[in-house]
Image: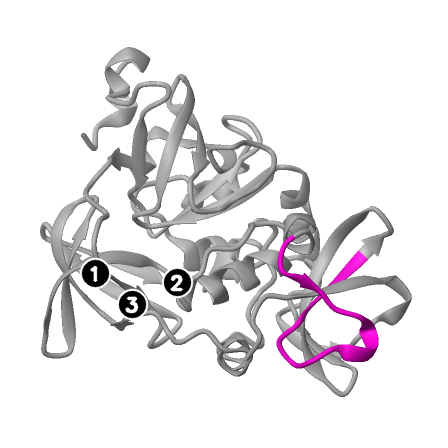
Amino acid sequence: MRTFWALSAVALSPFQVGGTASVDVSVATLWKAPNLYRAIDRPSVTNPVDLAQWSSNLATTADRVWLDSHVQTQALYGQEVTILAVQGGWAKVAVRDEPDPQDPHGYPGWLPLRQLARAYDTSGRYVVVRHGRTGTLQVGGKTIPLSYGTRLPLVRWGGDAATVRTPDGVGTVVGVDPPLRATNASIIAEGKRFLGTHYLWGGLSAWGFDCSGLIWDLYRVHGLTIPRDADPQMHHGTPVDRAQLRPGDLLFFGSRNYADHVSIYLGGGRQLEAPDSAHRVRISPVRWASYIGARRYLTR
């Protein structure tokens, strides 16, 4: 099933609306509609994807800002999706473990059908990529780079690698561990590993993060699933008064009724954030003028 472009729309799709599938590329980008991508975005819609080339193609701030109105989110290799619609060579899907009020099935968006595989067994213990920014999977004669935060079901450990179940069969992956113990100190330490990483609207991988995608991925590495976007993140956890802020609390910015940005409080009036398309992940002073509240997800 890798000759997708040569097949008709009917033959293309082994996927039924309402059924499940899995992401079959390192990172799938979900778009607001089919075929929205530009020529410079082509490396992100193939199988395999070439995310390093795509990042290189996004050479200017304007190239990246364009994505703000065209991209929904991303999904990591092996994540489960619900099929909402099929149109030509594209599927509208909802990513199950990216909670969002837009759809009860998960975060919705469009991706090429060639980036999907049939659903697979995701039960049992799992391991998560976290040793470096990326890991490497060997499966079915292929080598697939995996982003930080990719989570796969464990079959067994073997030396420095793990045998895992994947959308492409049983394979071997390096750079993985069991989920980390969830503490605020660990969330902060892991976040600092990505200082200097490009901001990418909709991004939640080591090749580029948006503000809430970075936080979603950091919690994922710690075995926790939180809402995908900043505003839903603000409506979970425990509200915290500004005078009671602790390192690790999530800070929210925007209007009184809507959060359009989130960061991690570091103490001393500083924050760790993925700010916008003109900047990279950084530590910066808290911009209290647009601050609207804080939430505490972890108590230790």
Find out whether the residues at labels 1 and 2 contact each other: C-beta distance under 8 Å.
no
N-terminal-most mark, 2 or 3? 3
SS for tag 3? strand
| Tag 1 near tag 3, CB within 8 Å | yes
- Mark 2 and 3 residues: CB-CB less than 8 Å, in contact? no
Q: Residue at (71%, 85%) from the top-left corner?
A: 267
- Front-most of residues 12 and 155: 155
The segment highlighted magenta reads: 236-253
Q: Which residue position is annotated with label 2?
A: 149
Return the x and y of residue 250 as percentages of the image width and height.
67, 67
Q: Amino acid at mark 2?
A: Gly
Query: Which residue is denoted by mark 3 in the rendering?
Result: 135
Residue indicated by mark 1 = 137
| Percent x, y of residue 66 | 67, 44
Query: What type is the residue that disc 1 sits on?
Result: Leu
Q: Which one is earlier in the sequence, the residue at label 1 or at label 2?
A: 1
Residue at 38% over, 31% down = 82
Quadrant into which the C terminus falls: bottom right
Q: Disc 1 and disc 2: Cα gap in Å?
A: 14 Å
Q: Tell me the SS state at disc 1.
A: strand
Let me know if residue 101 is in the magenta part. Answer: no
In terms of image quadrants, where is residue 153?
A: bottom left
Q: Position of residue 70 (x, y in %)?
A: 62, 37
Examine the rendering and report whether any part of residue 193 can be seen.
yes
| Front residue (pair 26, 238) | 238
**Image height of 272 relative to 205, above or below:** below
Q: Please, what secondary structure does the residue beneath circle 2 have?
A: loop
Percent across and percent down for residue 107 are 52, 39
